[in-house]
Amino acid sequence: MGGDESYSKFTQQELPACKPILTPKWVVSVFFLVGIIFVPVGVVSLLAARDVVEIVDRYDDACVPANMTDNKLAYIQNPNISKDCTRTLTITEDMKQPIFVYYQLDNFYQNHRRYVKSRNDGQLRDAAKANQTSACEPEKTTADGKPIVPCGLIAWSLFNDTYSFTRGNENLTVDKKDISWKSDREHKFGKNVYPSNFQNGLLKGGGTLDPAIPLSEQEDLIVWMRTAALPTFRKLYGRIYVDLKKNDTITVRLSNNYNTYNFGGKKKLVLSTATWLGGKNDFLGFAYVIVGGLCFFLAFAFTLLYFIKPRKLGDHNYLSWNRHPAGR
């Protein structure tokens, strides 16, 4: 092979490369380093999550009249029965503004394939494509064939419970501006696209839309149409820019309009503060602590194994990439 001019280090995979040798000291050092980094990060994340004050109130069952608790579906489907409901919340810890108001749905599968596909993004962006209702079945046109804007099951099932808050005689204003992603408002929902023929059928799935407001400004719709990956999810309803003190009593007047009773779903109202890490979520902190702790354990285990039953390391010169091919 020494006289073969076709020989090349590239074809023979002999180009210079980093090929570290995993000695016991190297492996133990890496595990210790990962543990030293991950455990403090996990602890800091857990402490940040513990600083979040969160109040969760399930109201779907509590807002059903006492005489209709055995027939909740009839209650929610009867337009002649008032859906107004009053709830009282007690603030457990001081809550600094902004206070985020979420609604939470349980057992609602927004990730179902047919549900996720039931929309037309071109129609949402461009008024000239209002007639494009492909993939929007079964909510694509009205009974007389007129296109529905926005079409599809996602828009049709728009969440329509409403909330208002008071503290004593003080009304707490819920700011609903910029609750959606800026990229969604600017690129996915057109400024010249207006709702038409929406919720005009016999069966209404959820909320209605103001036909005089373009889709790019209908932020409740934009938030709703960013579908959730899991059956339990929260979506931002608005923000309250008032500090709340411990033991404050908040009166919530809500309209219990959204039907979760026919599929066994749950509805919850959530008030939450936020830290530099976001809302309340212990998973990230626990994940870092567990991985860091596991690395410490492996480092100690390998160290003990190295001292109790050491293994002589072979000569590096015999490794294939350190040997020179014969005849060259």
Image (spheres, rainbow, N blue to C red):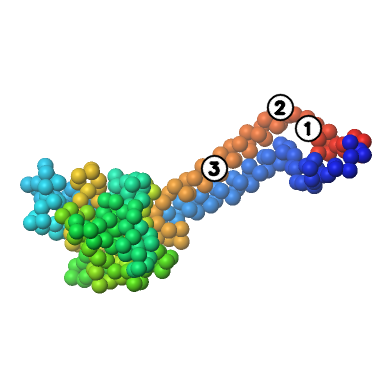
Mark 2–mark 1 contact, CB under 8 Å? no
Disc number placed over residue 291 in the picture, else none: 3
Task: Report the Cα–Cα distance between label 3 and label 1.
Answer: 29 Å
Q: Residue at x 34, y 68 (%)?
A: 127
Q: Helix, strand, or loop for circle 3?
A: helix
User: Which sits earlier in the primary sequence, circle 3 or circle 1?
Assistant: 3
Q: Helix, strand, or loop for circle 2?
A: loop
Q: Is residue 169 left or right of residue 223?
A: left
Q: Nearer the viewer's eye, disc 2 or disc 1?
A: 1
- Which quadrant of the structure image shows residue 194? bottom left
Which amino acid type is shown beneath numbered disc 2? Lys
Categorize mark 2 by other alpha carbons within 10 Å: few (<14), some (14-19), many (20+). Answer: few
Disc number placed over residue 309 in the picture, else none: 2
Disc number placed over residue 188 in the picture, else none: none
Q: Is residue 94 left or right of residue 146?
A: right
Which residue is nearer to you in this view: 164 or 117?
117
Instruction: Pinpoint residue 91: horizontal percent, then vertical percent.
Output: 27, 59
Instruction: Pinpoint residue 33: horizontal percent, then vertical percent.
Output: 64, 47
Q: Which residue is mark 1?
A: 313
Q: Residue at x 47, y 49 (%)?
A: 284
Determine if residue 56 is in view: no
Which amino acid type is shown beneath numbered disc 1? Leu
